[in-house]
Image (cartoon, rainbow, N blue to C red):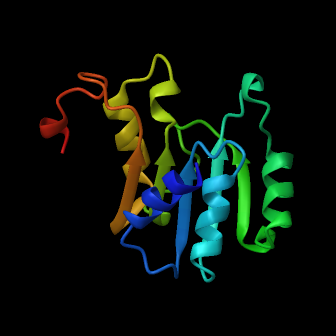
Amino acid sequence: MGRVHQVVLSHLDFDGKGQLLEVGCGSGALSIRAALSWPEAQVTGIDYWAAVYNYSQGLCEKNAASEGVAARCRFLHGDANQLDFPDGSFDAVASNYVYHNITGADKRALLLETLRVLKKGGVFALHDEMKPRMYGDMEAFA
């Protein structure tokens, strides 16, 4: 998974001097890698933390502390369908293999909600299953 995280972050044209959001942070691994990659960045990870995955805010905070980045990482319980952040809050947003798990969600609306919290000119990297029609017509979406 470490290589996947490196690839996802490599697709962010981010100078590391602002706010980064990870949607669906799970154990916090991608958020922590982002904080390690960009020492000036402030990183926020949000997740619903369904019990089936055995992840939690406490686990994420413990993991960040073990890597020495706890002061620059915060982890919040949240819903990707309704992000509790003002418009344009983040310079960069990343999500790794999460959106396909959000059942009952209109994938286009889900992605637009993520883009709502991204600053104009910000960067977004999404790694997920891109099965035909899961996100609708991708060319139309783009």
The number of discs equals 0
Reply above or below: 93 against 19: above
Q: Residue at x 59, y 36 (%)?
A: 79
Reply above or below: 132 against 13: above
The residue closer to the viewer here, 42 or 133, is: 133
Q: Which residue is the extreme one toward the top?
A: 104
**Left or right, residue 58 beside residue 9:** right
Reply above or below: 16 against 109: below
Q: Residue at x 52, y 56 (%)?
A: 3
Q: Which residue is the extreme one toward the left?
A: 140
**Left or right, residue 20 beside residue 126:** right
Residue 12 coordinates in the image, percent (x, y) = 39, 66
Pick the quarter of the image with the C terminus. top left
The residue closer to the viewer here, 117 or 94, is: 94
Residue 96 visible at all: yes
Residue 87 visible at all: no
Residue 34 coordinates in the image, percent (x, y) = 58, 66
Quadrant hosting residue 55: top right
Quadrant hosting residue 44: bottom right
Residue 108 coordinates in the image, percent (x, y) = 31, 32
The residue closer to the viewer here, 118 or 22, is: 22
Residue 76 coordinates in the image, percent (x, y) = 71, 49
Reply above or below: 1 against 131: below
Q: Residue at x 67, y 62 (%)?
A: 32
